[in-house]
Image (tube, helix red, strand yellow):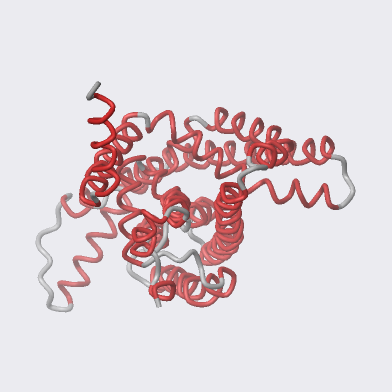
Amino acid sequence: MTQPTDQSTLSRYVNQSPSVRLVILAAGAIIIMAAIYAAASFLVPILLSVLFAVVFWPPLVWLQKRGLSSGLALGVVLLGVVLISLILLGFLWITIGSFGESLPEYRAGLATQMDALREMLNGLGIQSGESDQGGASAVDPGQILSFVIGALGQLFSSGFIILFYVIFMLVEGTSFQQKVQAAFKDNAYAYDYFSRVTESLQYYLVIKTRINLITGAVITGALWLVGLDFALLWGFVAFLLNYVPNFGSIIAAIPAVILAFIQFGPGFELVLVIIVYLAVNILVGYWLEPKMMGQGLGLSSLVVLIAVVFWGWILGPVGLILSIPITVTLKIFMESYEGSRWLATLLGSEEEAA
């Protein structure tokens, strides 16, 4: 007879003690993160599929508003998704294969350029050590290729699975909105929360994709004019890694700058490639992106940095791209409940706290 009383006492204690709630919340978060880490190989294709489905959803709505039936608009969008995916996969397959075939030539070129750089520094009175293979092996083009493949590998190793997920999500999306309205017809608060999450993700991904397309196109054109090998590949790497806030653009520049050093040596072309990346990133980061994003997503710079590192560790290289959408979703979720609203405030920017 005392068991219900004990349970109710425990329930009141948990509800009234913030420290107990915090411990339970932390324990639950650790368990969930451990489960996500263990299931990363399964979750990454699904999360990427959601990202692509959100990006391709506005064209579907746009076609429907232009008078196309839901079925015809869906068919047009699905055909575009399939064509873009096949073209992209074919391009990467051919380009990365060609890059791999050129590795012996680039290794030899790197050794030659390192010797030339060492002689130039010695001529200026700067002692740089004896000529050996250590300098060349320290920055191996093979390592550059491995980095690029590592950043893209999770995305394209299961590319066809992701493609099928996206197709089925778009097919289901045509009736999903009606299902959500029916599910939450008696709970306007829950429907408002769901709508905020969806609209925030769509806003961020669509605008960010437009910005990254401009960035990738400009870098591709500039590197092609300079004469750098595989300019289209480096433009695509810039497009993809610019989803990573703050330092994604820096990471994207590293392989292209090293290849410019191998191909041109420490001369005018190398400086020009560096200037291209600096100019594009300054223009995009300080003018274009703030103009198109408006006030942004309301995350502090420190939170963005921590989110990138954390989700990159949990989900691998693709986690760098997914870090901001996931963090924004969590922030909106925390804002929706009074008990966790203080966490959302800590995640927010200074403008929101003011």
Q: Is residue 202 left or right of residue 61?
A: left
Residue 258 spot, x, y in % from top left: 35, 58
Of the 4 image quadrants, the one containing the N terminus is top left
Q: Farthest residue toward the right? A: 67
Q: Quadrant of residue 182?
A: top right
Q: Residue at x 51, y 50 (%)?
A: 233
Image vertical order of residue 58 relative to residue 161, above or below:
below
Rendering quarter of residue 335: bottom left
**Above or below: residue 70 compared with residue 331:** above
As drawn, 313 above or below 5: below
Looking at the image, which residue is at 55% across and 63% down?
A: 215
Q: Nearer the viewer, residue 176 or 228?
A: 176
Residue 74 shown left or right of residue 323 in the figure: right
Can you give x and y, in whole percent of width and height, for residue 94 in the image? 54, 38
State the image coordinates of residue 238 (x, y, percent, origin top left): 48, 57
Q: Residue at x 78, y 52 (%)?
A: 62
Residue 93: x and y, percent?
53, 36
Vertical relation: 203 (above or below) 33: below
Q: Nearer the viewer, residue 51 or 158?
A: 51
Residue shown at 46%/70% (left/top)? 281
Quadrant in which the C terminus is drawn:
bottom left
